[in-house]
Amino acid sequence: MSALLYAELNHFRARPEPFSVITTEVLWTDPHIARQMLAAHLAPDSDGASRRHATIGAFVGWVDARLSLSGKRVTDLGCGPGLYLERMARRGAVATGVDLSATALAHARCSAAEAGLAVTYMVADYLKDPLPEAQDIVFLICGDYCALAPDQRPPLLRRIRHMLAPGGVLVFDVCPPGQMANLTDDFEGNYVCGNGFWSPDDCFAFRQNHLWPDQCISLEHFLVATPHRQFEIFNWKQYFTPATIAEELARAAFVVEAQLEFDTGFAWQGGATPLTLIARPI
């Protein structure tokens, strides 16, 4: 048994090929984890999921000032519990949200109804399921683009081009290489007594970080063992400079109109702050 356990943990710590395993759906469709993710989104002073609610309000404010949300058809891909869309709907946007998490969207629908807001929500995978068309603005917020594999990103950009009405724009943010500065290749293990993030049961949770600085890629890899099951989570992240994201967009026939700070809408100043882009189809 000890040899088997050692072999399994040693395999877990091995360095995989970048983006070789994708486990995105687990975070959003596992009932317990989805509830934990929803709680993280709703925490008003946390940047762990949807960003701090004050930052969300500031983002929607400058987007409205720059692009005029009133009457615009907008879709937020990966909308979570609708924290951005409700604020957009209050400013007159015709708002649609798309997300994998039925748990997050159940909350979003109830919240919108209580606020008297007409927001449409779709439980769907924006990589493959039908999406709204004739949209004036498509949002992809909170680094979602960076979690996608290189072979997933170009098809998504093509899908977004198809979503956009003439004159429409894509607004999204990416993680710059400055965010890798404080990351290290490290390993840790914990025993969690009941109702933790990963499981309602007691569990062992192991985490291994891997970095590929030359490729601007990181991986946060988890192995979780409960009395009833064992599973792994691969949280990949691709980091982009203004030049590399502009090149990737150009290959998909988009042109960058602006490179901005996420929370202010001012010109991006570099460093570790998220790089927000407004891009138009060519």
Image (cartoon, helix red, strand yellow):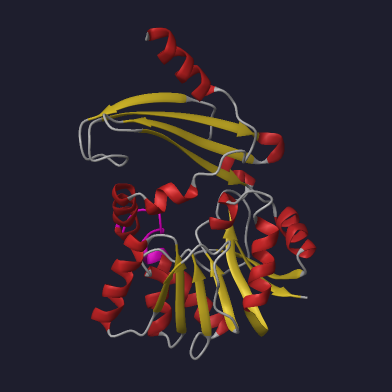
Q: Residue at 39% of width from left, 80% of height from top?
A: 119
* Residue that sits furthest to the bottom in the current view: 71
Residue 47 highlighted magenta (yes or no)? yes
- From the viewer's side, name the closer residue of 277 and 222: 222
Magenta stretch: helix, strand or loop mostly: loop
- From the viewer's side, name the closer residue of 281 and 244: 281
Please provide percent x and percent y for residue 262. Answer: 53, 63
- Is 226 positioned to the left or the right of 257 in the image? left
Please provide percent x and percent y for residue 104. Answer: 34, 62
Give the quarter of the figure containing the N terminus: top left
Q: Looking at the image, can residue 47 be seen? A: no
Give the quarter of the figure containing the C terminus: bottom right
Q: Looking at the image, can residue 15 be seen? A: yes
Please provide percent x and percent y for residue 148. Answer: 59, 51
Residue 269 highlighted magenta (yes or no)? no
Q: Is residue 207 above or below residue 100?
A: above
Q: Residue at 33% of width from left, 84% of height from top?
A: 117
| Quadrant assignment, res 236 | top right
Please provide percent x and percent y for residue 174. Answer: 59, 56
> Magenta segment range?
43-55
Q: Residue at 64% of width from left, 79% of height from top?
A: 164
- From the viewer's side, name the closer residue of 9 and 66: 9
| Quadrant assignment, res 167 | bottom right
Q: Is residue 130 above or below residue 154?
A: below
Q: Is residue 147 above or below residue 212?
A: below
- From the viewer's side, name the closer residue of 198 and 245: 198
Q: Residue at 74% of width from left, 60% of height from top?
A: 246
